[in-house]
Image (tube, helix red, strand yellow):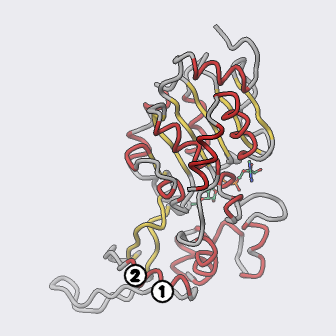
Amino acid sequence: ETLRERSLAAIAEHIKSGKARRIVVMTGAGISTAAGIPDFRSPETGLYANLAKLNLPRPESVFDLPFFRHNPKPFYVLAKDLYPGNFYPTVSHVFISLLAKKCLLHQLFTQNIDCLERAAGIPSELIVEAHGSFATQRCIECKTPFPDDLMREHVSRAEVPRCMRGPTELDPTHCEGFVKPDIVFFHEALPSLFHDRMDLVDNADLALVMGTSLQVHPFAGLPEYVKKGVPRVLFNMERVGSLGSLADDVLELGDCDTGVRKLADELGWREELEAEWRK
Ligand code: OAD
């Protein structure tokens, strides 16, 4: 049985009928642009278009571990702009938190490192931060954790923090290696939680994909694990990945806060959504 029509109204009906109780949400930088955080790949406003001034071999080098070991400064220039604490969750974040409140959120997979999902009140056990986050940090050499308060001070000045580990039995030197937040750089493994929770996608009865270009693997493969016949909705400026190629796909092209408000209207949740957002 496919959706009668490819529309948000049909998706809302699907949810209201009680057939969608295990909703999986997959997000990217596009859900945070309305909070004032630039995304990566948008042509004019994306971070990669604006990294030229940092003299990088390629824009992506800012997230490259060998490059970081050689020159961590560009990353810290960028980190100053991305660091959590100066931003508030968007309507899209709050909508996902509403799904959790209504016990409909099966799992959120996010590529974002801004911690706005937690700020929106989504319970941490329902979140997979596939690319890590700025919540913790450690030395890239000896892996010794680095204190949060000192990290905040360094980032606010775009200074590179260095490991403070003193001599140990095994190593008589002071470490002084560069400290990096526990975000996933290119060629680094994703957190094991990402792989552990992938089964939940297979289990979903509705998938919402929001604000991602689906350019970075393995995350970009997640929508392919949604079972055949289970509706996938894309809230994004542009069409991405294979979204739109299946009979039950719904494309809501445009800014995701507007799309989410439309869905909330169809669900009769609009007032609640706005009230939660203004809190
Ligand atoms: P991208 O910048 O690649 O893609 C953002 C997508 O969101 C694009 O398709 C935009 O058109 C869309 N978009 C922007 N603003 C939007 C809005 N208000 N409403 C709806 N759509 C909007 O960001 P990601 O897909 O998240 O890795 O990038 C994936 C990974 O690449 C990131 O996690 C990052 C980067 O390298 C790390 O940080 C380790």
Write down the residue under mark 2. Answer: 149
Q: Is residue 18 above or below residue 69?
A: above
Say which quadrant the C terminus sits in: bottom right
Q: For mark 2, give the secondary structure.
A: helix
**At 63% across and 50% down in the image, what residue appears?**
28
Write down the residue under mark 1. Answer: 153
Please tell me which residue lies in front, 101 or 197.
Answer: 101
Q: Is residue 208 above or below residue 83?
A: above
Residues tagged 1 and 2 counted as in contact (Cβ below 8 A): yes
- On whether ligand 1 comes within 8 Å of the CB at mark 2, the answer is no
Q: Amino acid at mark 2?
A: Asp
Please tell me which residue lies in front, 259 or 108.
Answer: 259
Q: Residue furthest top?
A: 1
Left or right: 264 as drawn, with respect to 119: right
Please tell me which residue lies in front, 175 or 133.
Answer: 133
Left or right: 32 as drawn, with respect to 126: right
Say which quadrant the N terminus sits in: top right
Residue 175 position, x and y percent, is: 33, 87
Q: Residue furthest right?
A: 44
**At 15% across and 85% down in the image, what residue appears?**
169
Residue 177 position, x and y percent, is: 40, 84
**At 75% across and 23% down in the image, what residue appears?**
7
The disc placed on residue 186 is none
Q: Residue furthest left?
A: 169
Residue 101 position, x and y percent, is: 46, 39
Q: Amino acid at mark 1?
A: Glu
Please tell me which residue lies in front, 97 or 249.
Answer: 97
Question: Residue 113 sits in which quadrant?
Answer: bottom right
Question: Residue 173 sits in which quadrant?
Answer: bottom left
Q: For mark 1, give the secondary structure.
A: helix
> Within 10 angstroms of label 2, few (less than 14), some, or many (20 or more) residues?
few
Calculate the distance from the C-alpha at mark 1 to the C-alpha at mark 2: 6 Å
